[in-house]
Amino acid sequence: MTSNNFKPNPEHKFTFGLWTVGNRGRDPFGDATRPSLSPIKMVKELSRLGAYGVNLHDNDLVRIDASPEERNRIVREFKQALDDHGMKVPMATTNLFYDPVFKDGAFTSNDPGVRLYALQKTMRSMDLGAELGAHIYVFWGGREGAEVDAAKDPREALKWNREALNFLCEYSMACGYDYKFALEAKPNEPRGDIYLPTTGAMLGFIATLDHAEMVGVNPEVGHEQMSGLNFYHVVAQAIEAGKLFHIDLNDQKGPRFDQDLRFGSESIKNLFFLVRLLEESYDGPRHFDAHSYRSENEEGVWEFAAGCMRNYLILKQKARQFNEDAEIQALLAEIHSSAPEYSEPLGAYSRDRAEKIKALPLDRTELAAKKLPYERLDQLTVDILFGVR
């Protein structure tokens, strides 16, 4: 676990949520299996392991009913710990799912009083994040959904959600915060159905916002796999759209409940292509939204955190090996090759270009006969991942 070949350091921009390493092992069928850790303890230990920073919900740091004096003292001591250990807070978010007031949603609650409370709580949380230096603000609507479709019109719910985000964009700009908002999708759990259940749905929703330019996405490995989707493809779409503002890394065993497993512990090939993509196209934090097995004590929590970072760095090295492998690159060149007369970029439509394409002597039998050595390419990829190449 401590090989110097895969030792993380702050330049890798690895971050963890206070709620991740602070997870006590509680689940719907069992109580906590390990004691609470203080935020200051988490900052210290993650710094020791080579992490770049920590992220937080408002109530991960300050309990929901804290007095102003208690809130200011906690924040002051936490900021001192960040300075002492050279740690950052790149991202902040609001807990709009735990308290009973959010039992039927926050921004999409049928009750306008609840919607206003959610807006109030978020603005105060944005103030906290800005005070700690965060530049990314994530929205996960864990209760924005339904079990009983007769109870709520999803058209109205989406309208309320849009109004809240438009308002909060204006609040951020009025306060001089330089936040980028990142929307996080999940198909279900804890609600039976959650509105905007995939990153693709979020991208469509963002286009309807007043300030779409400041809103992007925060895709999570497990959330998209719960829908049976290919996370590598999901992230590629977000990057191509210019909307990958943040990312949550973990792992998952197929379309089950949200497992939040150690990054790289299950979906090795898919996460290999993800890491390769991120290293080529993304410069933001690599945030691990995962938690240690319920069986672990505190020592196991730090083994888990170290393992997430180590696995990312292993896959990063494998991606470099893939890119430098002469046979793989030759196969890719063969696969992507085409006759020169067919290689001109498509470009924008023009009548002349359309007529030129219609006149091309394209022979479907000849095109179908082209060799595509995908089996060999895939096996070489597997050989690299298995460490035999």
Image: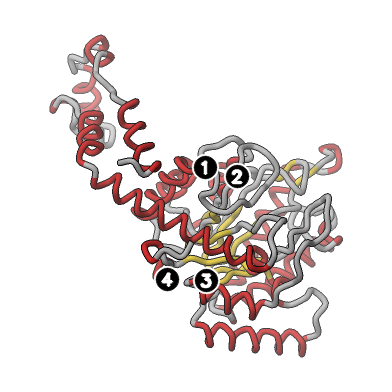
Q: Quadrant of residue 378?
A: top left
300 relative to 356, above or below: below
Could you say which is closer to the camera, residue 251 or residue 366? 251
| Residue type, numbered disc 1 | Ser
Which labelled disc corresponds to residue 9?
Answer: 4
- The mark nearer the N terminus, 4 or 2, is 4
Viewed as shown, does residue 352 lie left or right of 60?
Answer: left
The answer for how far apart the CA atoms under marks 2 and 3 are is: 25 Å
Image quadrant holding the C terminus, namely top left
Residue matched to label 2: 252
The answer for how far apart the CA atoms under marks 1 and 3 are is: 27 Å
The residue positioned 45% from the left and 44% from the top of the image is: 237
Local secondary structure at mark 4: loop
| Residue type, numbered disc 3 | Pro
| Residue type, numbered disc 2 | Gln
Asked if the residues shown at circle 1 and circle 3 are in contact, with their CB atoms under 8 angstroms apart, the answer is no
Residue matched to label 1: 267
Local secondary structure at mark 3: loop
- The mark nearer the N terminus, 4 or 1, is 4
Could you say which is closer to the camera, residue 105 or residue 54? 54
The residue positioned 64% from the left and 80% from the top of the image is: 40
Local secondary structure at mark 2: loop
Asked if the residues shown at circle 1 and circle 2 are in contact, with their CB atoms under 8 angstroms apart, the answer is yes
Asked if the residues shown at circle 4 and circle 1 are in contact, with their CB atoms under 8 angstroms apart, the answer is no
224 relative to 87, above or below: above
Could you say which is closer to the camera, residue 274 or residue 344? 274
The answer for how far apart the CA atoms under marks 1 and 2 are is: 7 Å
The answer for how far apart the CA atoms under marks 4 and 1 are is: 24 Å
Local secondary structure at mark 1: loop
In the displayed orientation, state which residue is furthest to the top. Answer: 365
- The mark nearer the N terminus, 2 or 3, is 3
